[in-house]
Amino acid sequence: MPVVLEHLGKRFGAGAPVLDDVNATIQQGEFVALLGASGCGKSTLLNILAGLDQPTSGALEVPSDGAAFMFQDSALFPWLTARGNIELALKLADKSGSQSKASRAARAGELLDLVHLGGAGDKRPHELSGGMRQRVALARALAQDRQLLLMDEPFAALDAITRDLLHDELERIWKETGRTIVFVTHNVREAVRLGQRVLLLSSRPGRVVAEWNVTEEHRTDAGRAGELTGTITRRLREEIRRHAN
Amino acid sequence: MPIEQDTLPAGEHAAEQTSESRHITSPSLKGNPDELRDLEAGLDKLQSDAHRKAHIDWTRIILPIAALLVLVLAWQFYVSLGLKRQDQVPGPLDVLGQFGELWSEGKAQEAILTSLQRGVIGFLISVVVATPIGLILAQVQPLRRAFGPLISGLQVLPSVAWVPAAIIWFGLSDGTVYFVVLMGAIPSIINGLISGVDQIPPQFRSVGKVLGASRLQMALQIVLPAALPGYLGGLKQGWAFSWRSLMAAEIIAVGGTIGFGLGSLLDQGRTLSDMATVMSAILAILFVGILIELLVFAPIERRLLLRRGLLAGSTR
């Protein structure tokens, strides 16, 4: 089921609109990178997609079961172990209460294995590195078992080595699970590295002003990828310069 | 551009795998999945904390004892200066002797046990009453706005002020004592829980909402555990208020069916102008407070903070 945004707008109180006339269609199984400078309403848009916030105008079509969400900081519950965090997500997702405790534990183990953290399940969040925490957060998001996965700059606070590694990891998991991913970032290279499509959001008000397809050619040819990164960066800077005066 | 390629898996998927392993970004990382797993395991080891061994920290025991010793010596020194009459300012040894006498008569044990029992029962009732009220007030905005100021006000109101009212309503009975204890402890536990809830990072609620928690699940599975440090602070303060209110009630309300507690002992010392008994009672009240803190609250708090990684760099 695709995600469709039609003339979507959002303003807080009587202030200037944060989002204005946002149009986009995201196909099932697609990996879309949502790019924009700070203050362009990327996070607001994600919150609306996740149902945490309501649009003030326009129409929105999202899967009826909602979306899984991954935050910029892992937002793991510090009073639970890594495994406990995932099990809680499984428990809260299980509305009918049909799952047994044992089956939840088994599923949590599988998810931990999926993010290569099979041995760290009993550690608490503060005992894990930033990259490990984000992987637990990813496993927790996957535990919700929803087709749409929203990611709000999930790797922004990580060091470069870890981020590189998590890009590979996320790509692998996306291919394995076939989720639809909307990935918000302010990093052009990250957007080109991960997305099949890059949407550029303007700032104040936020609006989709340009989009690029990242083809297989871009993925295998460094020159082409660099070219695309350059094009997108120039367009992004143009957007930012508009606010100089 | 030539890309470094490791061993290619054989089979019909080889062509597909080839294009995948030729991604230009981070080519060196694009080995087989096992390599990625090892790389991650290595990075995880490098980045996570080394396991620290638990050991007994003797300064934790020696320093408080040394501090106590210094204070007692200062007290003895002041008494030995002879500035005041000995019956008005007894020395540490006089007080110890008097306490020993009270102990051998069985009076000290009776007073401590009576007071401790009342304090603990009153405190437990307060916890049972205050916790649901606090949770509801913290979660439901109109109720919070309506009753919040009243609860804060009750916390400021000294619970001794309730003693005369309690005596009129309940007479000189245990009811009076418990009423005063409850009026002291309940508002402070409610306030502790509310401020604990207020300090929850807003993101935890967002996570709960995204994960599909119902209102009850949100309150019990997310809000309550997240607020636990603040709640524990409220419980500590609630205990302190219970203990203080209890002493006040026991000092003022003497006789009737009210048993013999530490406050009663204190009042008896006053009527007999027996300063050594008064000092014994004061010190007993103080030490019961310290013991409860050391044996009950400190270990729970330490464990709680340790498990959440909040103890690093603290002076505890």
Image (spheres, grey):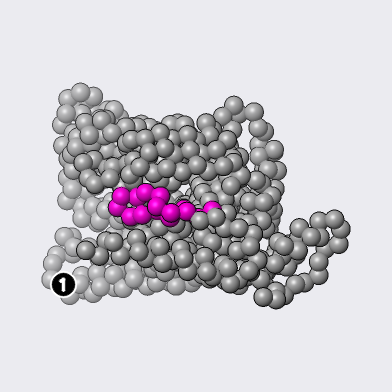
Q: In this rendered view, identify the residue nearer to me: A223 or B264.
A: A223
Kindly identify the residue that appears in the image at 70 percent across and 76 percent down. B2
Report the number of numbered marks.
1
Amino acid at dot 1: Gly
Q: What residue does disc 1 label?
A: B82
Is A198 in the magenta? yes
Residue furthest toward the top?
A: B169
Across and down, in percent, residue B243 comes to: 30, 44
Q: Is residue A91 visible?
A: yes
Question: Where are the magenta residues, as a range?
Answer: A197-211
Across and down, in percent, residue B90 comes to: 22, 63
Image quadrant in which the C terminus of chain B is located: bottom left
The answer to which quarter of the image holds residue A96 is top right
Across and down, in percent, residue B176 comes to: 25, 30
Magenta span main SS: strand
Q: Is residue A84 above or below residue B2?
A: above
